[in-house]
């Protein structure tokens, strides 16, 4: 029956060219109206496209995808609605209808062998019924904030993330943990070590190829420290694009793993006794192409602005912790025995520090926030870090080499977050309360005291975490 279907399939090299061209438009801040007109004309003319996948995220950062028939979308792009009461952290049932506005700048051509032929993907913004921005849509909040910085001060916020994950045998290994009681590694190799043809290397190669085709601008990829752990690095870019790429990275990895009869897991600590997964987030600010974080004569070659940015984040480290580590499982990762970054300080060498200062030059000088779990909401995390780094309260004492540590459990993190006037200020009272309540509800489903010595307690912990965080989570 395949000869009856003529859906779009584009070679990887051409995919990369198309996706990079749209990325360049985003970075150049081409008018949204121009990009809308171009994309809609393309969809009208390209008969081999059958559907458009429109993406948005809930307050917790979970990716939601709606496939619209192309012809319907072209006719109804200004009147897309969905039931917000069915999305965690969104509207209540009495006022459930929300609108979905397409961000035509965030348009992606997809590898047909990974996502199927005849589809393209685009991100969207969530709006209220009257068309105003929906405050719990953190993608929209991040986009508006970085645009305001650019319009007001000429500042571009650059972000690059290093996202670690595990590869386990079998599909849906996270959801099936209750029945299996374990995760089975596909590789026993370690840092930078795997044979060219082993399952982990095969997975990494396929995922990296798909990322490259989608315009990620790959840099390097490799097995990580723990067995069966991976990381694929790509170039820095503007903050909203970077956050979009985090969700696409995890989506690509999950899809490739499923095709190989495996599971890509981004739980912060799926296996006790080995290193967990982090999402190290590199940040710098630029104006007209000049890196504002670089100073050849500054401490560690960082500027006063960069050190102020660091000081403000460290000073608010306790308040930020719930946003950066928003699941019960994330606090299993903050274990100092496994290079966990739980110390509220900055260091060029100590990988246990909340902020590391990588070796850099005029182009690459940046800060690396290490205390972020890969299951955090990327838009919320980046938004909170940028606003805190630029606007947060300055410390009254030295915090760069302090002895304080981040909370070791989600309850303390929730309490710190609730008490933070600054978090309430930058998020708004409603979203601040709503996020804290969501996290409290999730935490209350887990045992308060998590056993680390008794096997039964560990298994129970994994069961609880599996139920709460893994169902369809990207």
Image (cartoon, grey):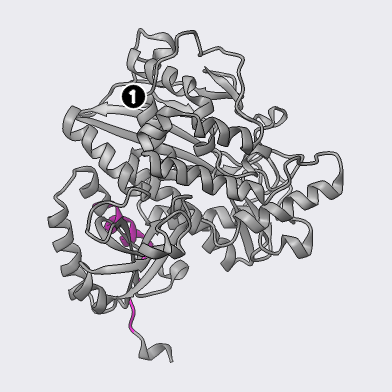
In terms of depth relative to the viewer, which is nearer, 91 or 46? 91
Residue 135 colored in magenta in the image:
no
- Counting the numbered discs, the total is 1
Residue under the point 72% across and 42% down:
448
Main SS of residues in magenta:
helix
> At numbered mark 1, what does the secondary structure look like: helix, strand or loop?
helix
The image shows residue 271 at horizontal and vertical percentages of 72, 46
Badge 1 density bin: few <14, some 14–19, many ≥20, Cα 10 Å: some
In terms of depth relative to the viewer, which is nearer, 200 or 178? 178
Q: Is residue 232 visible?
A: no
Residue 9 colored in magenta in the image:
yes
Residue under the point 69% across and 41% down:
226
The image shows residue 264 at horizontal and vertical percentages of 60, 56
Q: Quadrant of the N terminus?
A: bottom left
214 vs 407, left or right, is left
The image shows residue 139 at horizontal and vertical percentages of 35, 48
Q: Quadrant of residue 318?
A: top right
Residue sitting at the far front: 94
Q: Is residue 98 visible?
A: yes
In terms of depth relative to the viewer, which is nearer, 227 or 426? 426
The image shows residue 391 at horizontal and vertical percentages of 33, 24
* 409 up-or-down from 306: above or below: below
Q: Quadrant of residue 383?
A: top left
Residue under the point 78% across and 63% down:
180
* 123 up-or-down from 68: above or below: above
Residue stretch in magenta: 6-21
381 vs 75, left or right, is right
Q: What residue does disc 1 label?
A: 391
Q: Quadrant of residue 310?
A: top left
* 115 up-or-down from 143: above or below: below
């Amino acid at each position: 029956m395949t000869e009856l279907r003529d859906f779009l399939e584009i070679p990887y090299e051409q995919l990369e060219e198309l996706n990079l061209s749209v990325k360049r438009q985003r970075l150049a801040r081409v008018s949204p109206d121009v990009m809308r007109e171009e994309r809609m004309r393309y969809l009208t003319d390209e008969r081999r496209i059958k559907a458009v996948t429109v993406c948005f995220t809930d307050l917790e950062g979970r990716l939601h995808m709606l496939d619209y028939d192309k012809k319907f979308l072209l006719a109804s792009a200004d009147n897309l609605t969905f039931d917000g009461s069915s999305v965690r952290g969104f509207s209540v049932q009495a006022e459930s209808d929300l609108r979905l506005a397409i961000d035509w700048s965030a348009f992606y051509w997809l590898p047909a062998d990974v996502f199927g032929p005849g589809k393209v993907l685009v991100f969207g913004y969530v709006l209220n019924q009257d068309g105003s921005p929906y405050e719990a849509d953190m993608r929209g909040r991040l986009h508006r904030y970085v645009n305001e910085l650019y319009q007001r001060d000429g500042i571009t916020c650059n972000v690059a993330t290093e996202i670690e994950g595990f590869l386990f045998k079998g599909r849906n290994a996270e959801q099936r943990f209750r029945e299996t009681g374990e995760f089975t590694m596909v590789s026993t190799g370690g840092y930078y070590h795997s044979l060219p043809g082993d399952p982990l290397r095969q997975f990494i190669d396929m995922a990296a190829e798909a990322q490259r085709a989608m315009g990620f601008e790959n840099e390097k990829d490799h097995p990580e420290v723990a067995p069966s752990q991976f990381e694929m690095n790509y170039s820095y870019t503007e903050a909203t694009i970077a956050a979009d790429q985090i969700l696409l990275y995890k989506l690509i990895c999950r899809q490739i793993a499923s095709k190989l009869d495996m599971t890509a897991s981004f739980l912060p600590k799926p296996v006790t006794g080995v290193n967990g997964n982090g999402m190290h987030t590199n940040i710098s600010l630029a104006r007209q192409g000049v890196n504002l974080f670089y100073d050849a004569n500054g401490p560690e070659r960082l500027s006063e602005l960069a050190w102020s940015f660091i000081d403000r984040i460290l000073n608010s480290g306790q308040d930020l912790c719930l946003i950066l580590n928003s699941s019960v499982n994330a606090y299993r990762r903050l274990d100092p025995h496994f290079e966990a970054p739980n110390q509220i300080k900055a260091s060029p060498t100590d990988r246990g520090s909340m902020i590391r200062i990588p070796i850099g030059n005029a182009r690459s000088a940046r800060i690396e926030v290490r205390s972020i779990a890969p299951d955090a909401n990327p838009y919320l995390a980046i938004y909170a870090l940028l606003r805190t780094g630029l606007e947060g309260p300055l410390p009254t004492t030295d915090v760069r080499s302090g002895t304080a540590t981040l909370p070791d459990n989600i309850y303390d993190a929730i309490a710190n977050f609730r008490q933070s006037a600054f978090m309430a200020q930058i998020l708004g009272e409603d979203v601040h309360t709503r996020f804290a309540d969501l996290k409290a509800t999730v935490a209350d489903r887990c045992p308060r005291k998590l056993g680390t010595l008794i096997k039964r307690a560990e298994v129970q912990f994994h069961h609880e975490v599996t139920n709460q965080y893994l169902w369809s989570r990207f």
